[in-house]
Image: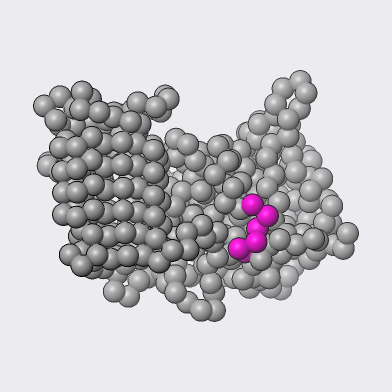
Amino acid sequence: MSSKEMIAMLLAGGQGSRLGVLTSDVAKPAVAFGGKYRIIDFPLSNCINSGIDTVGVLTQYQPLALNTHIGIGTPWDLDRNNGGVTVLPPYERSDNSEWYSGTANAIYQNMKYMEAYNPEYVLILSGDHIYKMDYEAMLDFHKQNQADVTLAVIPVPMEEASRFGVVIADENKRIRDFQEKPEHPKSNLASMGIYIFSWPVLREALLSLKDQSNCDFGKHIIPYCHSNGKRIFAYEFNGYWKDVGTLGSYWQANMELIDLIPEFNLYEEFWKIYTKQDKIEPQYIGPDATVGKAIIGAGDNINGTVHGSVLSAGVVVEEGAVVKDSIIMKDTVIRKGAYIEKSIIAENCVIGENAKIGIGQEEDSKLNPKIYGFGLAVIGDNSVIPANVTIGKNTAIRGVTDQEDYPDGVLPSGGYLIKAGDQS
């Protein structure tokens, strides 16, 4: 097998617990984004646009949707004989099934995969950010500085810096110090969780730390390299980059796509975002429909009103139904006269006739105020909402619900109904 200059290892294992019921059955990178894509399409497309044709995708939690989506990588032109995209689940050991126990442990478990390509450089990516980035420019920077490790960093407002791992770099961009979520940050350069390692340096660090529990890049590998005097540099990125890790940021990033001049442009010719396209039928907008400032997916059938919203493929909006400022995922049906505002409704849901969702005053979530906030109503995959009920804000629903679940026909703001399986 010919060796590769640089291969990518894409960490797509995350359960994405802060996305609540949206990730009870799918890994976060498989969550829909922008009406047509899944979050993982962005780093995969960045790889192919940057000329990287060998990508290992490390899955762990609920990998089925992700595996089905990636398949053999055809949409990204990653169906290669030598290289291409490979889905790498954790190995089953006979004595106990060895789960990945940290980002670096996941990479360590796939040492054989990396050795097979004998790369000069390894690019480590995570599957839960929305951005366009040329990794080749970062590799050039890595080579120019004769770096052992290069971290991509992005300037953030100083008041937000304590949410991130920040780096302190000198005038040559060599990193002198790190602060993990510091109370008093000394810098506003946040680590993006994107690393280029010279392969011998990565290999040695992984082997030295192989017994470290929950071995992690930010917490263990990078500090190990730093304390061993390795040359670590900060590559500053100034494009669009969004962590869509909370319901609020996820909703916001989708809403920004429909701004008049979107901050993040999905329509650029020269840096395309590729995805697996299931639905090929055209969308249909009925004679009495009103649609404004919205993304409408392939095969959608719209007979009601849609405004300020992002709809995936195969969505049906019946007569008299209204969808405002919401995200509606694949194959969801919104029956006649329903009213939906500032909601996120996942795939394959049915919203009954004249149901009202996202109505009333905000109250704190009784399920988990850290997750279910931002004034959003959130409904997980395969849920059913009966006719004529009213659902408030900061609510969470998952499963097939019926009239009896709504005393007086109402789920008040802050309330929740979790029917299928246990979901904290």
* Residue 74 lies in the magenta-colored region: yes
Residue at (35% x, 26% y) in the render: 419
The answer to whether any part of residue 222 appears in the image is no
Pick the residue in front: 127 or 298: 298
Is 92 situated left or right of 295 in this image? right
* Quarter occupied by residue 160: bottom left
* Quarter occupied by residue 411: top left
* Residue 251 lies in the magenta-colored region: no
Magenta segment, which residues?
A: 71-76
Q: Position of residue 255 (x, y in %)?
A: 31, 60
Q: Quarter holding the N terminus?
A: bottom right
Q: Position of residue 257 (x, y in %)?
A: 35, 65
Which residue reaches farthest right?
1
Residue at (68% x, 55% y) in the render: 72
Give the number of callouts.
0
* Quarter occupied by residue 138: bottom right
The answer to whether any part of residue 303 appears in the image is yes
Is 368 situated left or right of 112 in this image? left
Residue at (41% x, 57% y) in the render: 313
Residue at (47% x, 63% y) in the render: 280
Pick the residue in front: 179 or 125: 125
